[in-house]
Image (spheres, rainbow, N blue to C red):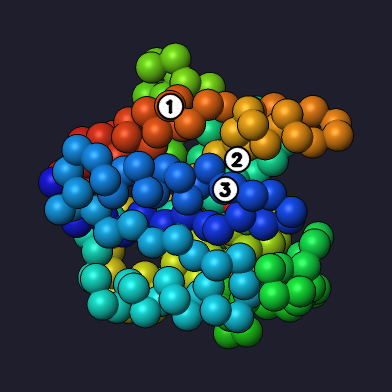
Amino acid sequence: MKHWLITGFEPFDGSHVNPSAQIVTALSQSIFPEHFHGLILPVNAKTAPAILVENLQQIRPQAVLCLGEAAGRTAISIERVAINLMDFRIPDNAGEQVTDQPIAPDGPTAYFSRLPVRKIRDGLLAEGVPAELSYSAGAYLCNQVFYTLMHFLATHNMDIPAGFIHVPSLPEQAARRTSLTPSMSMELQIEAIRKVIEIVETENP
Ligand code: PCA
């Protein structure tokens, strides 16, 4: 089994939890902890990319999966593309709202995921987990971290499976919102991400 770096995010936008962080914590404590390096990133445009890069350099993982929450999504969303743009809809947790800025001024417009995205979607659906391919990770922190990851790998000759997946909110989060949004239980989210890891291991032995 590969040595994985799996990241999630701290809560943001007034929420008290972030399912992506809970998945990372659950996975790092479960079945094969020696293969996982879990990392919870801050929702901070200045520090999150630096922390990610520092961990990539130190850990030198053989596979990377970054996770984030997308309120309103109805399924596990496998992101296909990271764009070179920060255009925040809301401020980050430090109160900064970056608009119209590139992530890497000299970087390419976009990167594709290095995960077997269609096989992951099909594998999740076959397990009975709602899953979809997504063509935009937004222009907020998740896209920034996704782009930073792909740009680092591309500029450091690291040919490893890596990408980003958005997960829905938890039922307890949806229940607190004034207009109800879709949700998925933590049990199912953990099962989904375990399955993703299994598919990537099978596709990239
Ligand atoms: N979701 C946000 C940032 C942190 C998170 O979990 C996003 O989709 O950009």
Which residue is labeled 3 in the image? 18
Q: Furthest residue to the right? A: 178
Which residue is labeled 1 in the image? 187
Residue lying at 60% horizontally and 80% vertically, measured from the top left: 46
**What is the x, y in percent for residue 116?**
37, 41
- The answer to whether residue 137 is above or below residue 148 is above
Work out how far the residue at label 1 is from the one at label 2, CA to CA, in angstroms.
Answer: 22 Å
Q: Nearer the viewer, residue 48 or 130?
A: 48
Q: Secondary structure at mark 1?
A: helix
Q: Which mark is residue 70?
A: none
Residue lying at 71% horizontally and 68% vertically, measured from the top left: 92
Q: Secondary structure at mark 2?
A: strand
Q: Looking at the image, is mark 2 or mark 3 earlier in the sequence? A: 3
Mark 1, Cα crowd under 10 Å, few <14 / some 14-19 / many 20+, is few
- Rendering quarter of residue 194: top left
Q: Nearer the viewer, residue 138 or 180?
A: 180
